Image (cartoon, rainbow, N blue to C red):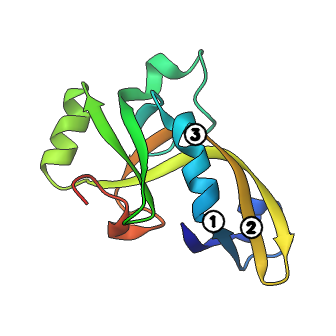
Amino acid sequence: TGRQDYAASELSEPGSGLISVDRPASEVQRSAPSFEGVPITMDHPKAMVDAQTLDNCAVGLITAVHFDQGTQQLKGDLLIWDPVAIHSIAVGRRELSAGYQADFEKASNGFIQTKIKGNHVALVPQGRSGAAQRIGG
């Protein structure tokens, strides 16, 4: 939840700067069911995960997804079955980054993100939210 910076290109906006996007807690909470059972990937795939790409990129899945009122974040249980992914977690790769579709509505101070629909959760070296979104965090 809260404000995060996105590259203009991520929002199909002109320029090369950063644009502030507000992700309201109500929208994140509403999105929780859409992340139930989504695949976990190593880094983000080039496109959204679908039936044709699932076998090539899934290293696990996420379950028991819920919105934690105290931290204002989604939380869940990760089931990882891929030995390379398990090893990468063991040696320190713990940050997470959600892959999703959403609407971005223009606002006076940037954009507001709405209608979030989960597609995957990526294990990444460094996520947009940093240590706030991590395994064990």
Label 2: which secondary element = strand
Q: Position of residue 118 (x, y in %)?
A: 58, 39
Q: Calculate the distance from the C-alpha at mark 1 to the C-alpha at mark 2.
A: 6 Å
Q: Residue at x 42, y 44 (%)?
A: 66
Label 1: which secondary element = strand
Q: Residue at x 24, y 24 (%)?
A: 81
Depth check, front residue: 19 or 31: 31
Does residue 25 appear left or right of residue 109 in this picture? left
Does residue 5 appear left or right of residue 79 in this picture? right
Q: Residue at x 46, y 21 (%)?
A: 56
Q: What is the number of the mark on residue 120?
A: none
Does residue 93 appear left or right of residue 53 in this picture? left
Q: Calculate the distance from the C-alpha at mark 2 to the C-alpha at mark 3.
A: 17 Å
Relative vertical location of residue 63 with respect to residue 66 in this rendering, above or below: above
Q: What is the number of the mark on residue 112?
A: 2
Q: Earlier in the sequence, mark 2 or mark 3?
A: 2
Q: Earlier in the sequence, mark 3 or mark 1?
A: 1
Label 3: which secondary element = strand
Callouts 3 and 1 close, C-beta under 8 Å: no
Callouts 1 and 2 close, C-beta under 8 Å: yes
Relative vertical location of residue 41 with respect to residue 11 in this rendering, above or below: above
Q: What is the number of the mark on residue 23?
A: 1
Write down the residue under mark 3.
118
Instruction: Using a 10 Å C-alpha cutoff, classify the residue at mark 1 as few (fewer than 14 neighbours), some (14 to 19) or many (20 or more).
Output: some
